[in-house]
């Protein structure tokens, strides 16, 4: 009988353990874990800069200033001290306060996107090109709220932001951008295909269309490199026929997965005849607009027909012995054949390429003057279409 009692007692003990399911939670432990979550987990991060924003736990804590119209990444779930916590986001709604757009998280995601409701306005500019600051609306304050949960324990924290008004941006593809009114604020997107060493400008492409960003030195520390997909915002304009944005407000590196409509750069293939026909159509704008070269400035291009390197000239067309180094523009004059007609095409060497590249072009020319090359680089524009290389690699000796 004693053995039986022991056996029954053992079953009862096992049954009690099996029937209770998960161990009971410890509210004090859960609350302590949530305190650590709030202290150590970056619940809100600037999507563009990666900066972490801390909650406002008491009066006197900083109100975060959002200057550049960036979005936020917020945590919706995570693990701390081997415990799974969740976060529910909302915002404080009241008249005069900023709002937030909280995206629905993708399945299995541990974070989601929050877009602050920046006020937008149409900028006005002084004759100097600077913005008239008196026209800018006052910032709005917005409060983002997080309820952090672990079992039965909860913590509520707030994140306060001063959201500065943003220029109203008209995003356009590269074809539409070319028809923009001068000084119109536009945004364009494309893959970076070249950057001048002095960051005077960079070129982007969407498929076989190109576009120029003028004066980007303020963004040279942002990690932008050839091959990145970027979005740039600035005033539409042009320079001697080349389309570009200038007075640039911002350039952001983008995730290609979010912009599948933007195509990887493609090369246009042009012929000597295209340059000949463009020259012949001077004075006839409609004919020039029908030429394949039209509206392709800043795009990638190839000429697979042989071109002969014949001389170096300055910007005024005067022959000079060498490619000058320093703050001087020059050209390598190339000759292609359209039937029996010699067609002159300028390879335009902008001084923004820097002295190292200028020296490389001079060395190449001096070593191969009179020889035949193919061209594979950019098309530029200075009152007419020219070849616009960034480096000497664009010149390919014909085997």
Image (tube, rainbow, N blue to C red):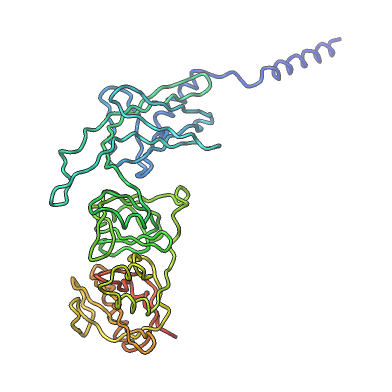
Q: Nearer the viewer, residue 173 or 30?
A: 173
How many marks are shown on the rendered structure?
Answer: 0
Screen quadrant of the C terminus: bottom left
What residue occupies the far right of the structure in this picture?
Answer: 1
Q: Position of residue 370 (x, y in %)?
A: 32, 89
Q: Position of residue 233 (x, y in %)?
A: 30, 50
The correct choice, above or below, for 255 with respect to 60 in the image is below
The correct choice, above or below, for 39 with respect to 270 in the image is above
Q: Nearer the viewer, residue 215 or 55?
A: 215
Viewed as shown, does residue 263 lie left or right of 216? right
Instruction: State the residue at coordinates (53%, 19%).
Output: 26
Q: Position of residue 145 (x, y in %)?
A: 39, 26
Q: Nearer the viewer, residue 175 or 6?
A: 175
The correct choice, above or below, for 138 with respect to 374 in the image is above
What residue occupies the far left of the structure in this picture?
Answer: 127
Q: Nearer the viewer, residue 115 or 302?
A: 302
Instruction: State the residue at coordinates (28%, 71%).
Output: 284
């Amino acid at each position: 009988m004693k053995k039986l009692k022991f056996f029954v007692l053992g079953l009862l003990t096992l049954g009690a353990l099996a029937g209770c399911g998960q161990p009971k939670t410890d509210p004090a432990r859960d609350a302590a874990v949530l305190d650590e979550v709030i202290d150590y987990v970056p619940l809100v991060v600037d999507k563009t800069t990666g900066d972490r924003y801390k909650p406002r736990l008491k009066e006197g804590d900083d109100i975060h200033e959002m200057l550049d119209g960036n979005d936020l990444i917020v945590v919706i779930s995570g693990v701390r001290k081997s415990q799974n916590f969740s976060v529910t986001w909302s915002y404080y709604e009241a008249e005069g306060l900023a709002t937030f757009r909280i995206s629905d998280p993708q399945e299995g995601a541990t974070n989601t996107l929050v877009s602050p409701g920046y006020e937008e306005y149409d900028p006005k500019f002084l004759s100097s090109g600077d913005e008239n600051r008196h026209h800018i609306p006052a910032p709005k304050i917005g409060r983002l709220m997080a309820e952090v949960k672990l079992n039965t324990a909860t913590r509520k924290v707030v994140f306060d932001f001063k959201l500065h008004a943003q220029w109203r941006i008209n995003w356009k593809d590269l074809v539409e951008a070319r028809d923009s009114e001068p000084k119109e604020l536009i945004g364009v997107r494309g893959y970076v295909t070249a950057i001048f060493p002095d960051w005077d400008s960079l070129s982007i492409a969407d498929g076989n269309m190109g576009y120029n960003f003028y004066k980007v030195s303020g963004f040279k520390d942002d990690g932008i490199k050839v091959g990145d997909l970027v979005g740039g915002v600035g005033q539409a304009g042009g320079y001697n026929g080349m389309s570009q944005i200038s007075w640039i407000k911002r350039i952001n590196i983008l995730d290609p997965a979010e912009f599948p409509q933007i195509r990887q750069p493609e090369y246009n293939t042009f012929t000597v005849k295209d340059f000949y026909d463009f020259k012949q159509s001077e004075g006839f704008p409609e004919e020039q607009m029908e030429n394949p070269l039209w509206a392709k400035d800043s795009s990638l291009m190839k000429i697979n027909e042989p071109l002969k390197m014949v001389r170096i000239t300055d910007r005024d067309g005067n022959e000079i012995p060498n490619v000058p180094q320093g703050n001087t523009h020059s050209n390598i004059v190339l000759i292609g054949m359209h039937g029996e007609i010699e067609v002159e095409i300028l390879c335009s060497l902008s001084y923004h390429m820097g002295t190292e590249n200028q020296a490389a072009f001079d060395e190449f020319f001096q070593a191969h003057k009179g020889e035949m090359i193919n061209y594979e680089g950019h098309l530029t524009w200075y009152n007419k279409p020219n070849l616009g290389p960034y480096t000497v690699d664009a010149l390919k000796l014909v085997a």
